[in-house]
Image (cartoon, rainbow, N blue to C red):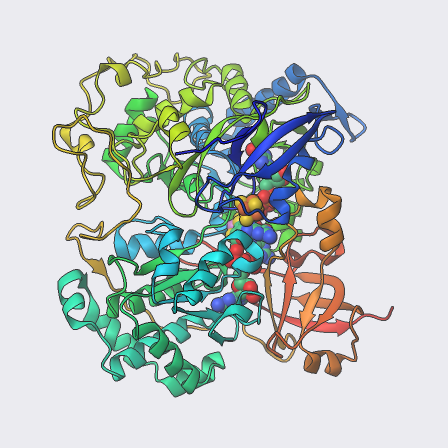
Amino acid sequence: MQNTGTRSPATTPTHCPYCALQCGMNLTPVGGGTVEVSERADFPVNRGALCGKGRTAAQVLAPGVRLTSPLVRSQGGALVPAGWDEALDRIAGSLGRTRARYGADALGVFGGGGLTNEKAYALGKFARVVLGTSQIDYNGRFCMSSAAAAGTRAFGLDRGLPFPLEDVPRTGCVILVGSNPAETMPPSLRYFTELRENGGTLVVVDPRRTRTAEQADLHLAPRPGTDLALALGLLHLVVAEGRVDEAYVEERTSGWEEARAAAMAHWPEHVERITGVSVPELREAVRLFCAPEAAMVLTARGPEQQAKGTDTVGAWINLCLATGRAGRPLSGYGCLTGQGNGQGGREHGQKADQLPGYRRLTDPAARRHVAEVWGVDPDALPGPGRSAYELLDALGSDVRSLLVMGSNPVVSAPRAAHVEERLRSLDFLAVCDVVLSETARLADVVLPVTQWAEETGTTTNLEGRVLLRRRAVTPPEGVRGDLEVLHALAGRLGVEKGFPVDPEEVFEELRRASAGGPADYSGIDYRRLAREDGVFWPCPAPPPHGGPALRAAVTPPPAAGDTAPRADTAPRPDTAAPGAEDAAAPYPGAPTPAAGGTAPHPGTPRLFLDRFATPDGRARFVPVAHRPSAEEPDEEYPVLLTTGRVVAQYQSGAQTRRVAELNAAAPGPFVELHPRLAARLGAAEGDPLAVVSRRGRAVAPARITTGIRPDTVFMPFHWPGEGRANTLTNPALDPDSRMPEFKVCAVRVEAVPR
Ligand SMILES: Nc1nc2c(c(=O)[nH]1)N[C@H]1C(S)=C(S)[C@@H](COP(=O)(O)OP(=O)(O)OC[C@H]3O[C@@H](n4cnc5c(=O)[nH]c(N)nc54)[C@H](O)[C@@H]3O)O[C@H]1N2
Ligand SMILES: Nc1nc2c(c(=O)[nH]1)N[C@H]1C(S)=C(S)[C@@H](COP(=O)(O)OP(=O)(O)OC[C@H]3O[C@@H](n4cnc5c(=O)[nH]c(N)nc54)[C@H](O)[C@@H]3O)O[C@H]1N2
Ligand code: SF4
Ligand SMILES: [Mo]
């Protein structure tokens, strides 16, 4: 329950716009357009703590910083202010013409994991129902998609953390793999310090001695791209040292023999040669992980953003399964998602292969269910489209027009110079953003939208906790919400109904669309979210599900006509409530609502305690073997480049590069390198270095530290221009998740004469 305590009446409790922790904060307008951010101690995830980005987030609400008028490309080629009607007419007219000429799949949509659940849901529906295109994906593909693929493969269900963060300090050991929460989620560091205060141990796996690694009992610094071998080496030792939990493996898993055989092929000495982590260090990690009764493995982008990210996460999951550390109290595998709605953003249909409720677009039952909620013919729903990088790569050829909502790929996509060139080759680009991002600068039309604090909506944090972000301030003149944009474009494209502008109305429809799916939100509503500290999905509605009150909210199908693509012509009778299976637990073994059927479902903070979400209830081992990165160093490109984040900037920097305090703390890109490599190059601290890969060249000052492997350089990716890390990165994709290999490519480093 929220303790609103002594808050002033003008103060609104809400959540940070940025990362997946979704810290609670209070916002108070204090006049003159200024909004004050203050501590909100009652929210359990951050208990009042905020990082610098959160503390300064309200500065981006100021009219001088953000967009307040639509912009259209003039005859002379400049972006000039325009009215909303003109801007919307241009977008709808252009999309309609492209579709008439080239077909619906010539229209692309690129969404974002920062969008609320309501926006992500409406965007996916807009693409499939209004545009009729299969070509939609989003930046979350660049984020946690490998963990999602591996989690689904092993457990039958993907939710970032299968337990709340509050469990972390109470387990015995945590292995943090390629995760730097000291910089990427500072308030969460407390969970790891408390773990150690409670006698637990922390193992950090990172090629760099990060601020997080400095807190660890054991820091393993593998060569970038070798986590798969590392995890296999640990599993090998688990077997060799007789630490397999045979009873658990027998009772709760399948596929152990094959996975065991694969691990046995990875001798510790062999793993040491691949990873650079010594055999004694491997043994120590196994000892720390296996000694206590409970333990966890948490991964983030380090092992996931690899062309073998899915198998890599699979290898860490195998380690958990062999030792009985999944689906038991205070034990398990989890992925720390990244963006504000990194979790919910992947559940409700902006991903190329998914429908709301985390349903698969290729599943006929899922298509029937969602088509019914949308009032369209299931056969009219397009199939799966291209993944994010493949979509960007197809711009200007197969895909001629693009709508971007909530991403800045000019800075954040791999092989960014190529992506920028593809964006420029489009017939038409429309961007909805709060600021004039590098991607918006290339657009034919830019729509200025309202921000987090100016609108209500839900997000789902890294724990699977669905939260209510409340509107706290009035938006400036001239901006409109993303939902209003979709409503207006749908109307102009002939779909008058089904795109409400009220987020609660959208959420009510999302509930029904998600009902019975893996990510079932049907038991959650705004009233409940306003009372509770969030509700963990799955949270099915109590049976009898979908009684008259809920069903009455079904949005009528869009009127048919040649501009209403693929919509069912005959309004569907609002047939019987969904079958009994919809009212049942969202997956076999999930907690069901109390008998009697009227008590609200409490939500599911902890998954898999009784069984996994697979058909037989067993977690699946997957036999995986190490393989090299898509690009290994050679004579021409002898050094490994890895990329990531610094505490004071967020993502492409579109928002945080507009805050003076953050720029002072992190003014620009840099190349982190070891003194030995620096000496070889004759480079001193601050000297400009050129980093050259097969895709391009970037220049940034040297930052010399013994905290990085001598064979590796690191660049943060938050800046455009000369120091853009993504000019260099390799778009080699994971075969399962289609994740690009942001975390490893081969480069050459050269001193640049000043
Ligand atoms: N300040 C800040 N916070 C953020 C964000 C931000 O942009 N800025 N973004 C948010 C988002 S969307 C995300 S996804 C999260 C990301 O959160 P993190 O995953 O914690 O962030 P990264 O810096 O991308 O990567 C983590 C670590 O992986 C290491 N690493 C690099 N290569 C490898 C490798 O091959 N193996 C291993 N094991 N480790 C490797 C890097 O050295 C780095 O320290 O942060 C969220 N929070
Ligand atoms: N080299 C390298 N590249 C990476 C990564 C890496 O580790 N290394 N990490 C990858 C990861 S994990 C991620 S998540 C991506 C993120 O990369 P991006 O997708 O570029 O992320 P953001 O900078 O958050 O972009 C969000 C954009 O949407 C705008 N925006 C914010 N809120 C809203 C809203 O409500 N509506 C609308 N319409 N717009 C909004 C912001 O102003 C911003 O321009 O980068 C990836 N790129
Ligand atoms: S940790 Fe994340 S959610 Fe919390 S204040 Fe910082 S950016 Fe915002
Ligand atoms: Mo991310």
Q: Quadrant of residue 314?
A: bottom left
Looking at the image, residue 163 lies above or below residue 545: below
Q: Residue at x 52, y 58 (%)?
A: 181
Q: Nearer the viewer, residue 664 or 240?
A: 664
Q: Pinpoint residue 533: horizontal percent, then vertical percent.
A: 40, 37
Q: Nearer the viewer, residue 100 or 702?
A: 702
* Quadrant containing the C terminus in the rendered view: bottom right
- Most extreme residue toward the right, as rendered? 754
Looking at the image, residue 513 lies above or below residue 360: above
In the shown orientation, is residue 252 left or right of residue 462? left
Q: Quadrant of residue 384?
A: top left
Q: Is residue 572 visible?
A: yes
Looking at the image, residue 213 lies above or below residue 382: below
Q: Pinpoint residue 586: horizontal percent, then vertical percent.
A: 23, 39
Q: Nearer the viewer, residue 281 or 317?
A: 281
Looking at the image, residue 367 lies above or below residue 180: above
Q: Pinpoint residue 422: horizontal percent, then vertical percent.
A: 63, 45
Q: Pinpoint residue 665: horizontal percent, then vertical percent.
A: 72, 54
Q: Nearer the viewer, residue 467 or 77?
A: 467
